[in-house]
Image: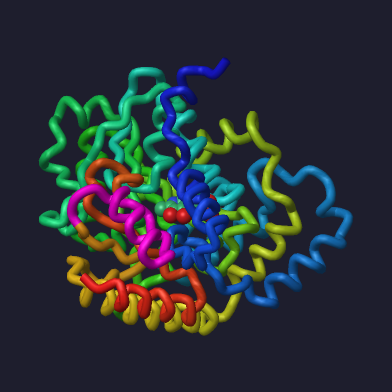
């Protein structure tokens, strides 16, 4: 019945975890779900109110435009200017997405012919690899290793592989690791991509969840980046809007146009009222994001200490919503034992690729009191 494309596909990581959670709940376990990066804090009221208003405007009830409202795209461009000092032309360098996952999943269809290759980090958000395969491409794995500060070793990519690659996916601040990239890596990356004519698809939904005072970067801040790169961005994590499904891809106009063309044959745009509310979100006072950051930072501190006390090897994440802890051995078995002993659901690292094996990812998107409860269960569990 099914095409090879889905017969060869593993279950989506979080769908499989959902099943384990449901089974535990059915057994009466008080599950603390630290598996998914889905902010527990509600969308701020001024954004919800903007949606209420926009939803009752009949001009928002018809098909939206394929590329998104110019007003939304302008709000994205203004946000990029304010946040990163990056200039974007809302007319051709910004495209509205139905969440960044949608754009990431469709992007390879615009650039990959069957047999072409895509450079894909591992461990990583699983969509990069599957989207490449859906387009008939071959993912070429770039391991993210601790000894390289969890950055891909560009010198280790063979010239033959580099020549075959049409696109490269990257993601900093990184899910699942929490690592960030610095300017010198981005500089080297752009030179590498230029040498081999590789399009860079940089996924940047965690740019605003950083904790050590130093803001995180947009790849587009680097000189020459716009010649060959686009960046995916999302309102999901910055404004607690995962359920709203709105994001954008920005940067190189030809790359943006390719993704727009694919999308115009697949979907019919993002609900216009959600875009109106998105404009309000993107114009929110900076203090609002600062407040969220403070809450996350506190949660990271307490969970980090508990995991360290348990003997896990980990670094405090500089950004993102995740702690990435080395436990050694099978991460699936470890996650199973953790659920059994504590009722805590965490994500086995191998779910993000084979270089994630031996690690467990803990998300901090549960209320602080639940994270404190998780900490006390971890303390009881002992080493
Ligand atoms: C690295 C990364 N990229 C993209 C997404 C998708 O975000 P959204 O589709 O909600 O914009 C996520 C969500 O967890 C993510 O972790």
Residue range corresponding to the magenta coloring: 328-349
At x 68%, y 71%, the residue is 47
At x 70%, y 58%, the residue is 274
Q: How many numbered marks are there? A: 0
Tell me if residue 344 is in the magenta stretch.
yes
Vertical placement of residue 72 versus 256, above or below: below
Does residue 43 appear anywhere in the picture?
Answer: yes
Image spot of residue 332 (x, y percent): 32, 48
Quadrant housing residue 44? bottom right
- Decide which of 311, 69 is in the foreground and name it: 311
Quadrant housing residue 194? top left
**In what quadrant of the picture does the N terminus appear?**
top right
Quadrant housing residue 56? bottom right
- Decide which of 26, 176 is in the foreground and name it: 26
Q: Residue furthest front?
A: 27
- Decide which of 58, 368 is in the foreground and name it: 368
Vertical placement of residue 37 versus 82, above or below: above
At x 26%, y 32%, the residue is 140
Image spot of residue 129 (x, y percent): 37, 36
Image spot of residue 368 (x, y percent): 47, 80
**In what quadrant of the picture does the C terminus appear?**
bottom left
Vertical placement of residue 138 versus 29, above or below: above
Image spot of residue 63 (x, y percent): 78, 43
**Is 356 placed left or right of 270 in the picture?**
left
């Amino acid at each position: 019945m099914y095409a090879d494309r889905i017969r060869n596909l593993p279950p989506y990581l979080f769908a499989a975890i959902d099943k384990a959670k449901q089974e535990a709940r059915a057994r009466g376990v008080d599950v603390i779900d630290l598996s998914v990066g889905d902010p527990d804090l509600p969308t701020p009221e001024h954004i919800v109110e903007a949606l209420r208003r926009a939803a009752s405007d009949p001009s928002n009830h018809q098909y939206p435009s394929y590329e998104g409202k110019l007003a939304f795209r302008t709000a994205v461009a203004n946000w990029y200017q304010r946040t990163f000092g990056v200039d974007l032309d809302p007319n051709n360098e910004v495209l509205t997405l139905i969440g960044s996952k949608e754009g990431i999943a469709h992007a390879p269809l615009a650039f990959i012919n069957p047999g072409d290759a895509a450079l894909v980090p591992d461990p990583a958000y699983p969509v990069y690899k599957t989207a490449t395969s859906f387009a008939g491409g071959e993912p070429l794995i770039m391991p993210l290793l601790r000894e390289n500060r969890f950055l891909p070793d560009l010198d280790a990519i063979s010239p033959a592989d580099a020549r075959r690659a049409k696109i490269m996916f990257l993601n900093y601040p990184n899910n699942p690791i929490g690592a960030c990239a610095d300017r010198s890596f981005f500089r080297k990356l752009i030179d590498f991509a230029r040498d081999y004519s590789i399009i860079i698809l940089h996924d940047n939904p965690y740019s605003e969840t950083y904790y050590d005072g130093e803001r995180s970067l947009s790849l587009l801040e680097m000189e020459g980046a716009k010649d060959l790169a686009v960046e995916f961005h999302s309102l999901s994590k910055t404004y607690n809007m995962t359920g709203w499904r709105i994001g954008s891809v920005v940067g190189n106009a030809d790359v943006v146009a390719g993704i727009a063309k694919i999308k115009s044959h697949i979907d019919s745009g993002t609900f216009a009222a959600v875009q109106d509310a998105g404009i309000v979100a993107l114009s929110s006072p900076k203090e609002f994001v600062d407040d969220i950051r403070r809450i996350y930072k506190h949660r990271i501190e307490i969970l980090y200490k508990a995991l360290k006390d348990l003997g896990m090897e980990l670094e405090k994440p500089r950004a993102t919503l995740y702690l990435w802890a080395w436990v050694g051995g099978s991460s699936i078995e470890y996650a199973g034992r953790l659920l059994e002993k504590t009722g805590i659901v965490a994500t086995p690292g191998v779910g993000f690729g084979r270089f994630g094996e031996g690690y467990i990812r803990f998300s901090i998107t549960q209320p602080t009191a639940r994270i404190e409860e998780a900490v006390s269960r971890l303390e009881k569990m002992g080493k």
